[in-house]
Image: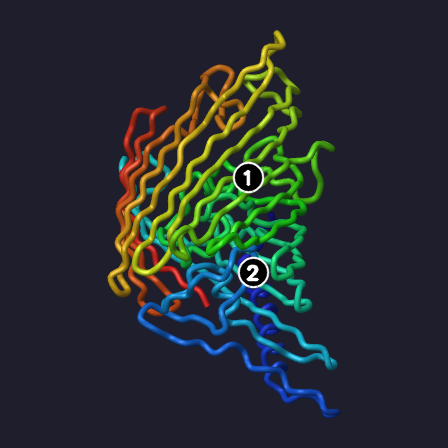
Amino acid sequence: MTMLTSRSTSSFLAALLTTYLTTSQAGAQPAPAGGDAAPEPAPEMTFGRRGARAEPQPSHPSGAPPPTRATGRARTMEDVTEAVTEELTIRNMRWRYSLNFFGDISLGATKPAGTDHPFGFGLGAQDLLIRGELSSQITATTEIALEPGDGGVTVDVERFAVRWQSSGYFIEAGRTHTAFGYWNNAYHHGRWLQPTIARPRWVAFEDDGGMLPVHWVGAGVGARLPVGAATVNWQASFGNGRGTIVDDVRNAHDYQAMKAYHFSAEVVGIGVPELRAGIAGVYDRIPGIMERTLVPPGAAIGEYIGGAHIAYVNVPLLFIGEGYWVAHTAKDIMGSTHQFNTYGGFVLVGYAFGRVTPYFEIERIAAKGVDPFFVRTDLNDGVVDSFDSLKGILGVRVDLTDWTALKAEYRQTREDDKSRTIYEGLVNWSWGF
């Protein structure tokens, strides 16, 4: 992460926009003489009751089959990138690329007054997504988030990967979003795309209070296999394991030769084209290079993660349900192995009435034992923070145009460890283009 001043951030964005506009203009020029065909135009956008879509239908980088595109706004980040893909010719070589921006701003209030977020405005991240088709089968993706804070702007490279993909298989390497559940690989970092204002805590980013390794630095393979009227998507990968804390994503190197392993499988088209269900698992060993309160100094922690999901994301009905179980194992000073379990999940239900979508979400996080990796502890005062909570959200989303939405939410969170309930009201204006 890098801290930038307002002036350096403005210079960075200005240079990026200048480059984008220059290449866009270059792509609009006729092809050079010599019989080379002019580049084909970008896909035409067609509009309907809820938004825009592109023809022809896209092939999703996740390996999932293209969804049955009901007339409406883009539902995933891949929908957006396919809809705005440009093509230009440089020295008789064609280059297809897309550049997208996502942003949001919120106004919220929290009760009781002693919490960290009183009444006030908050800027969301300015998310930049760059995707280039290096050939008919190879694509490269870069996603950069500019996260405003009181001390400046933090620049995070969220995704940085290259992929080879055929009609049924793919191989990829780099920093990606871990393939578990539906939410993590559908919405990424653009808040406008997701139904709610914030991600559920189970799939929140590591630096935003999350618990799962939602980012993966490594390599993997996957396939899409037709089975009757349905499709089975599976993916296996290995990569750098967790660092010593939840927010320590190992981008440049790993602490240990031991790698983390992941597998997921999903069935799409169970009875109806949009209905999907799947499972996923992760195995890792967290290095024991720091002192922890609940395990001996230097002791490694084994990590086992299991997840299952079912989702139906269509117009007008929206349903996403995901459940997770995380087990950490560690030995005490006597050599006995102890296991700490954290489990729970979330369910989101919404129904669209034209451009207005009311929704309800409930999320539960529970633990058995004081987890030595998740819970911040103090040797003298004991536990000072944990994840145990029950949250309910009642909200409404209004798609003002095809590329911007207004969301309003009432949240109520019961924190078990502190025996208190937090009440929140939040209004968010998000956009993408």
Depth check, mark 1 against mark 2: the one in front is 1
**Quick one: 418 or 70, which is closer to the camera?**
70
Residue under label 1: 213
Place residue 407 in its image quadrant. Answer: bottom left
Location of residue 270 in the rendering, given as x and y in whole percent from the top left corner: 42, 50
The answer to whether residue 188 is seen in the rendering is no
287 relative position to 393: left or right:
right
Mark 1 and mark 2 residues within 8 Å of each other at the beta carbon: no
Q: CA distance from mark 1 to mark 2?
A: 29 Å
Can you say whether 117 is above or below 377 in the image? below
Quick one: label 1 or label 2, which is nearer the N terminus?
2
The residue sitting at 67% across, 53% down in the picture is 171
The amino acid type of the residue labelled 1 equals: Pro
Q: Amino acid at mark 2?
A: Thr
Q: Indicate which disc residue 9 carries.
A: 2
Which residue is depicted at the point 43% across and 27% down?
386
- Left or right: 41, with 348 as reference point: right
Residue 46 on image: x %, y %: 41, 76
Tally the numbered discs. Answer: 2
Q: Nearer the viewer, residue 125 or 192?
A: 192
Instruction: Tell me the quarter of the picture where residue 304 sits.
Output: top right
The crowd level at tag 1 (other Cα within 10 Å; few <14, some 14-19, many 20+) is many
The image shows residue 139 at horizontal and vertical percentages of: 64, 62
Q: Which mark is residue 395?
A: none
